[in-house]
Image (cartoon, rainbow, N blue to C red):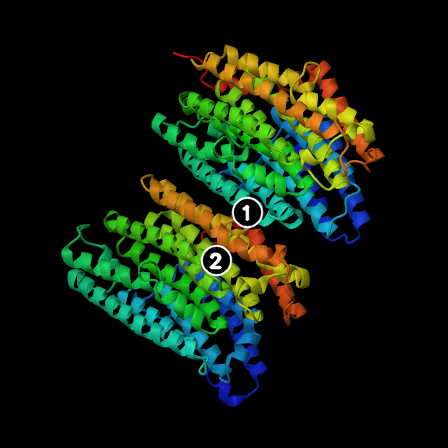
Amino acid sequence: MIPVLLIVIPLVSGLIAFLLKQERAVKAWALLSAIATLVVSLLGLTVMKQESWLQFNKPWLPYLGSNFHVGMDGMAQVLCLLTAVTLPIIFIATWNNSYKKAHNFFALMLLSQAGLMGVFVALDALLFYFFWELALIPVYFLCSQWGNERRIAATFKFFIYTFLGSLFMLIGIIYIYQLTPGKSFDIQAFYSADIPGPAQEWLFWLMFAAFAIKMPIFPLHTWQPDAYEQSPTAATMVLSAVMVKMGVFGVLRWLTPVLPFASYVHGDTVGTLCVTGIIYASLVALQQDDLKRLVAYSSIAHIGLMALAIFVPSNMGMHGVMIQMFNHGINILGLWIVVELIERQMGTRKMSELGGLAQKAPALAILLVVVALANVALPLTNAFIGEFMMFAGIFTSAASQYHYAFAGAAMVAVILSAVYTFNMIQKVFYGNTSTLTAGARDIRINEKLVLSAIVIMIIAIGVYPAPLLEMTQGAVDAIFSKMITKQS
Amino acid sequence: MMFTGILSNNKRLVSVIGVLGMTALVVVNLLEMSGMRFFTIDLHNMLWFDTFGLLFNTIAFVCTLVYFLLSGRDIERVGTHVAEYYALTFFVLCGVSLASSFNSLLMLFLAIEIISIPLYVLTGSDKRNLKSNEASLKYLLMGSFSTGLMLMGITFIYGAKGSFDMDVIRMGSGELTPMLGAGILLLLFSIAFKVSAAPFHFWTPDVYDGAPTVFTSFMATVVKAASFIAFIRLFDHSFGDLHKEWQLMVAIITAATLFIGNITAVFQQSVKRMLAYSSIAQAGFMLFALVAMNQTAKEGLIFYTAAYSLATIGIFAILIKMKDYTFEGFNGLAKYHPVLAATNAIFLFSLAGIPATAGFWAKYYMLASAVQQGHLLWLVIVGLVCAAISVYYYFRVIQAMYFKEGDPQPIDASPAFKGLLIGIAGIVVLLGIWPEWLIDKLYFFF
């Protein structure tokens, strides 16, 4: 029941939100719905842990062998929790923004949440594809309608990119479906499909294209900085905190366990792409003056590391990916909120035009520093746990003979990330105040609230990650056992 | 229908009778499907009504009914001879039901002719418009040419097999004699012309653009779908055993159609012309069914015709109300006519094949049928790339409606019109969530 509720609550409340005309009413309604979803997802973690609560299976398209099969394992729970946490944070943080046609805006936000939840809980390939696309449509409208100047072109590029990728995935899904015993789209049938080696190899690239575009992995990342920059910040938050995780999640659930042979054979190729992407994105991030673009490139680097840990697999590395998916979502949310605050107050995102904010807004500065420390994965922050596990995993992986090289190259990126993150803090918060920042004031209570919540989560997970690790242990073992991980 | 024009000069009355007649047709057809027949005529095996044909008839009739209801007002506006327009439409439908049930090549020829001749007239019905006349003449000339090809093909096949009867043609050795081959090729070309497959598509944009928009809507949907049903029926029943021989040929035609339709559509400035090219592109997808020619393909084609016709009729109904057919004409539509814009967006989603609309399943069935064939993956990839291209031009309309500012156009949309549009959009979405509801009807009716 829990996964169904997670889809239905945002879906229905989103549709209702279309009809509410008053801006304040629709804001309250959206927040209420987001909190209800959060409560449900927390219930699934704590009180209603039994299988019967977490699974739901009803026939949908019997002739095709597709069921409305949803369920949650540890990985789905972590990502659902992330999605459920993200929306209320976004709504509270952007409470003071006013939008044209607010009812449409909030309705689309809720609909995108429904789509995302669907992606994470679907255990049927066709259903997964369905939600995969449905999550995209509301975001497309959000970004094109409320974004910045070049929004239409940027979002369109993003849309066509991901749509083409998902079509490739669809072909992959249909082909694997032909090979499943008893023709079914169910995930278990996919896992037990007998796919010959050569077919695995091209299927791998078809499916990988979809996920790689979403994550994004070099060289398919070009849509991302533009889309992030041009989208309204609330939509950017959804995109970067949750939507890119769809790609990582898709690889973990639908790619590596289904096509283990090809994942093993092409692991090094993908690993090379990831490492190239990590270093490239970090170097580009160094050069950025625009805060949004800086965060966007930094995100490419972080996601690239996750992908590397999946394709140079090890149990510990995968475990690191699981919790890093959550951590990265939280951290980048924090960064976006700060960027949004700065932009709204100063009217610019250019680092060169800012400076000295720490004197004017001390609370903001303190909170940002913590988030930034988490972004560079300092010990005692949540990202340290995740990145440490991933690096340790890559370093000790038995699946690739280049694992030392991969780990070493990725390490360089951590140093670079420290350079650009601290550079940003220095330019924005310290130094002399510019004309723009002279009149700045400190943040409002609601903004302080969400940022503190994020900071608390960062430190809590950084100090005591055990609950998250326990939650995902089962999922990691299940996926890992299906992969080929030893050199023979 | 013809005589109502004599009896009454009242345009409204004619429309009402048209709608009533259409409803009667739908009802009779549904009864026929459920096994209730009013009378039986010995047709000497010339026609054969199976569920496949009957289900398609239902779809075609329902679509036409919807079309009458949505665009009746605009049919009245084309010219003074309203009764004739309705009558001609009914003649076309007569051809459509022949096309979905023929069992003899003679009947096929008859069906195609009954469909085509009224259309020549309808295309030219805007008598004072030079473009309409030009389109009509072009259509007539090209159409007669393809009819000639078809006749020649039928003659060749008669020569090879000694019968027009498709059951007889099917029998005999599966060997491809030169004469039979020539016959199949000529038939293939002539029907490819009717469904506007490349490289026989050149008439389509001009004719669709020149014809009065209401009739373009009808031509691009019901008529095109009927030609497809005839196409698959002919090749399945008569030449199914020779599938391997002509498959590659059709596959190449399909790929060419997809490419030309989609890529040319990208460069159009007028939405009406874009829709003409998009109809070529959609024809490319429907041709997948012919290439694959398996159970999935046939189910899928039925579904495709329904999904495509409903969405296209809806878009055209909105387009007719616009003064300005360019993309700019749609600017800011969402602001002044939210209902029209929202339903239009759903129809465009459906054409683009976005999930949760009927169009997604239509494309799904087509792609799945080709994947099942195993060795046609190159064609599937071509299809995919083209589907992605099609998103580009369909979404240009959505962008214009939602994200660009524009002046409001005076659009007279009655509440009934809007209600009907919402109804169709609802059906499109419902079919997008439970596609098997329609496909079930092929096997279990009532």
User: Left or right: B352 with respect to A450?
Assistant: left
Q: In this view of the protein, can residue B427 be seen by the observer? A: no
Residue appearing at x 69%, y 24% in the figure: A372
Q: Chain of mark 1?
A: A
In the picture of the structure, the residue carrying the numbered disc 2 is B308
Q: Chain of mark 2?
A: B
Front one among A449 and B386: A449
User: Left or right: A336 with respect to B117?
Assistant: right
Quadrant placement of the C terminus of chain A: top left
Q: Quadrant of residue B134?
A: bottom left
- Residue A437 x/y as whole percent: 77, 36
In the picture of the structure, the residue carrying the numbered disc 1 is A156
Label 2: state its secondary structure: helix
Position above or below: A302 against B190: above
- Residue B305 x/y as whole percent: 45, 58
Position above or below: A11 against A449: below
User: Left or right: B4 with respect to A288?
Assistant: left
Front one among B205 and B11: B205
